[in-house]
Image: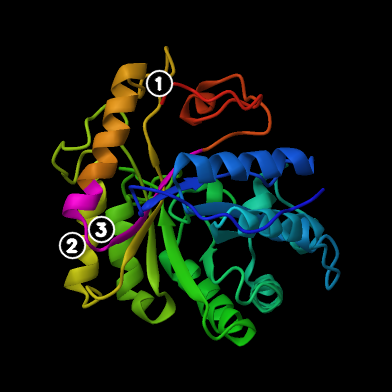
Amino acid sequence: MVVGEPQPVQTGHPILCVHTRLTDEVEEWKIQRSLRMVRELGADTIVEFIPWAYREPAEGVYSWAHTDMVVEHAEAQGLTVIARLGLVPQWAQPDDLENGASLNYLVSDHYDEFATFVEAFTARYRGRIDHIIIWNEPNLAFEWGYQPVDPQQYIDVLAHAVPAARRGNPEVVVLAGALAPTLEPPGSPAGLNDVLYLTDLYEAGFADYYDVLAVHTYGFRFPPEEPPAPDVLNFRRVELLREIMVRYGDADKPVIITESGWNDHPRWTKAVRPGQRITYTINGLEYAEENWPWVENLCIWAFRYPAPTYSWPDYFTLVTPEFTPKPI
């Protein structure tokens, strides 16, 4: 397939970004069409998941073809790529866990192998992908292999992965955190409140291991201007996390909201009506531009899924699997 010459992105909202979810898209024309539509939308940045499990199926054996294809088409559309790295390959998984739990269970015995992958990735895509996210939502048990969430363990992962990333690409920008909004209290088997988790990260030396804080902030049933509060999950909850950054002397570091948005499923308890979703999304983008100078990008989850889930997650997307743009 002809990739084509790089195209400029014309946008009135430079902070706009989308999570593309091309990870499981196998047909090249669909990758190309997705990224062309992203450019036409007016977003100049994408977040794309690059699973360690897919790219290193056997230890020391790398498979870069799919990522190469995504990067080539992203470049042709004038898009900046932020790569989220995670998902444990089978050869690095524990043998004694329940089915599925091991996909996100990175045991300390394999921190070095993960770091080796991170170095290989940043070296291969130096100058093409210069922004990486280390892991995803480590304050949720599901994303932490169903083991108790532990900020110190995440710091340990960063302590291995970040120096390796810089060996591969000294100019790499490391995003860390990627915290999920949750009110889970200490000791909960489901996770830990993101405000408490970030505080614990800083107490464990977090400031030394990242360049940009990655945050997930969803509106749920609230409009974007709803004030933040410790016991509320809403769009402005990111302001509580920013306060922690400032308190610990990290005010000079920016934030990238790597997941955000509203859902308009007709029966999900945390959804809004379709018209509200449109209004809230546009107003949220404008609110961020006017009030959050420390936010570099606001990334909408999600642009498109390769196939439907037949459940409420489908109502986060902007485009159907058949490439039909939704009203939003």
Tell me the kind of residue under disc 3: Leu
- Residue matched to label 2: 243
Q: Is any atom of residue 196 visible in this view?
A: yes
Element type where label 3 sits in the image: helix
Q: Residue 37: where, in percent of width, then height? A: 56, 39
Q: Residue 9: where, in percent of width, then height? A: 48, 52
Name the image quarter holding residue 271.
top left
Quick one: quadrant of the C terminus?
top left
The answer for how far apart the CA atoms under marks 2 and 3 are is 5 Å
Residue pictured at 52% horizontal, 46% vertical: 39
- Residue matched to label 1: 264
Considering only order in the chain, which callout, 3 or 1, is on the residue closer to the N terminus?
3
Where does the magenta region start and end? 288-302
Tell me the kind of residue under disc 1: Asp
194 w.r.t. 322: above or below: below
41 w.r.t. 67: above or below: above
- Residue matched to label 3: 241
Residue in the foreground of this view, choosing between 61 and 151 = 61
Element type where label 1 sits in the image: loop
Residue 190 lies within the magenta run: no
Q: Say left or right for 276 vs 165.
A: left
Element type where label 2 sits in the image: helix
Label for residue 299?
A: none
Q: Nearer the viewer, mark 1 or mark 3?
A: 1
Q: Residue 76: where, in percent of width, then height? A: 64, 56
Neighbours of disc 3 within 10 Å: few (<14), some (14-19), many (20+): many
Q: Are marks 2 and 3 in contact (CB under 8 Å)?
A: yes
Neighbours of disc 1 within 10 Å: few (<14), some (14-19), many (20+): many
Tell me the kind of residue under disc 2: Glu
